Amino acid sequence: MNFEEAKLKLEKYGQTHVLDYYDELAPEQKEALLTQIDETDLSVIRYAANPHGNQERGKISPLGAMEIPEIEKNRERFEKAGLEALRAGKIGAVLLAGGMGTRLGSDDPKCMYDIGITKPVYIMQRLIENMMDVVKESGRFIPLFIMTSDKNHDKTVRFMEEKNYFGYDKEMVRFFKQDMAPAVDYDSKVYMEARDRIATSPNGNGGWFKSMMSTGTLDRAKELGCEWLEIFAVDNVLQRIADPCFVGATLLSGCATGAKVVKKAAPDEKVGCLCLEDGKPSIVEYYDMTPELMEAKNEKGEPAYNFGVILNYLFREKDLERIVNDELPMHVVEKKIPYMDKDGKDVKPAEPNGYKFETLAVDLVRELETCLPYEVAREREFAPIKNKTGIDSVESARALCKLNGIEL
Ligand code: UTP
């Protein structure tokens, strides 16, 4: 893209300030900026005008779950089916690690965070240790695909190399990068990160499958025989990944998706809640939970919207290919965005100062027709690390690790 074309594109989206320093830049910086302008999707900025009004919701009704007693009754059957699929190489694991982890406040990728007390125990190490249980049980390594972003890719790869993949078979691990989106202030103007760079951030975890496709990672998964892909978050240090019982239950259910869920700790807990929307599986986010939904009861007198999702889903690959071009809802998220101010100084804001644009993996569930909500015990499988202290923190995750006999 040349200067004139870049200017035209910026005019169209009201962002000509991006070129304010152009004349002062060295030739290679000019080139880099023009390339970034060319590659950045500025059309998403329109969503900032109405940050909370981008999704029209259908009629919400309750959706139960396969609960623990039922799972235990069928455990043997489920595990047998799951192990068969795992041994046949049909299951791939996809770690969503492209996020910025701003709440945790570390400059390194979240997977590098050390939660150890008496010895180093990195978040990534905990995830790999959990996967090794399945490797031992099934007798083979599960293909592992790790999504990173421009912001944390090099550090993540270097870390894994340095740590020798924590004993995982390196040949079974592939990294791929997700796309980025511009970040804007409250007047919908993109922030500049430097004189020659628009401030961008990862565009949410919803594009993981598209990015797997565009980077050729999906071809690799298919070569390895993967028919199902289990996505999981980087920050839940207790979660079981590709565990045979969950895999078997999902495959035998005939559903296109399996979603691990936990009983909510309280009706207003800040987790997305699995439900039906116009008769199809969907998730109602905690901020959309009305008092009526929170108070609704089922025929057993229990809360009707009682199961929270923990960002651990098993998807049938073929179904994802079918919906890959469907447009997902855009979430406009208020965040702290580092930027360069008018005097050229770097600013790291202490409070949110604008919006980022994200699509979310949960919204893929809505696109598919069927989903098996599969209950797991929260004290055994749900220890997310979002913050340093308090709820969903390093502290709470350490306590849960201790409860499960994990030495830190
Ligand atoms: P979070 O919602 O916790 O976002 O991501 P985050 O960016 O990591 O953290 P905060 O909000 O800035 O503190 C849930 C999961 O989705 C991944 C994260 O890495 C985490 O595993 N994710 C999030 C991506 O892979 N890409 C994204 O663009 C956003």
Image (spheres, grey):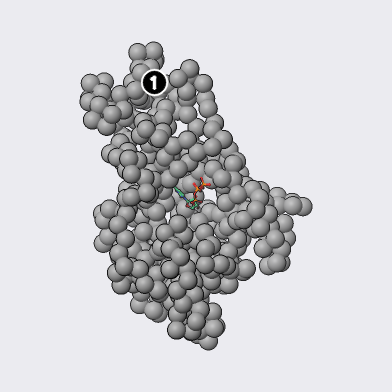
**Which quarter of the figure is the N terminus placed in?**
top left
**Residue 97: percent from the left, percent from the top?**
49, 50
**Residue at left offset 54%, top offset 37%:** 351
Q: Nearer the viewer, residue 386 or 110?
A: 386
Q: Residue furthest right?
A: 118
Q: Nearer the viewer, residue 39 or 374?
A: 374
**Residue 265: percent from the left, percent from the top?**
57, 67
Q: Residue furthest bottom?
A: 73
**Residue 276: percent from the left, percent from the top?**
36, 70
**Which quarter of the figure is the C terminus placed in?**
bottom right
Relative to 110, 20 lies left or right: left
Q: Nearer the viewer, residue 76 or 58?
A: 58
Relative to 317, 143 lies left or right: right
Question: Does 288 sit above or below residue 187?
Answer: below
Image quadrant in which you'd find residue 252: bottom left
Relative to 23, 231 lies left or right: right
**Residue at left offset 35%, top offset 24%:** 18
**Residue 53: percent from the left, percent from the top?**
33, 50
Image quadrant in which you'd find residue 251: bottom left
The amino acid beneath tag 1 is Gln
Q: Which residue is mark 1?
A: 29
Q: Is residue 261 visible?
A: no
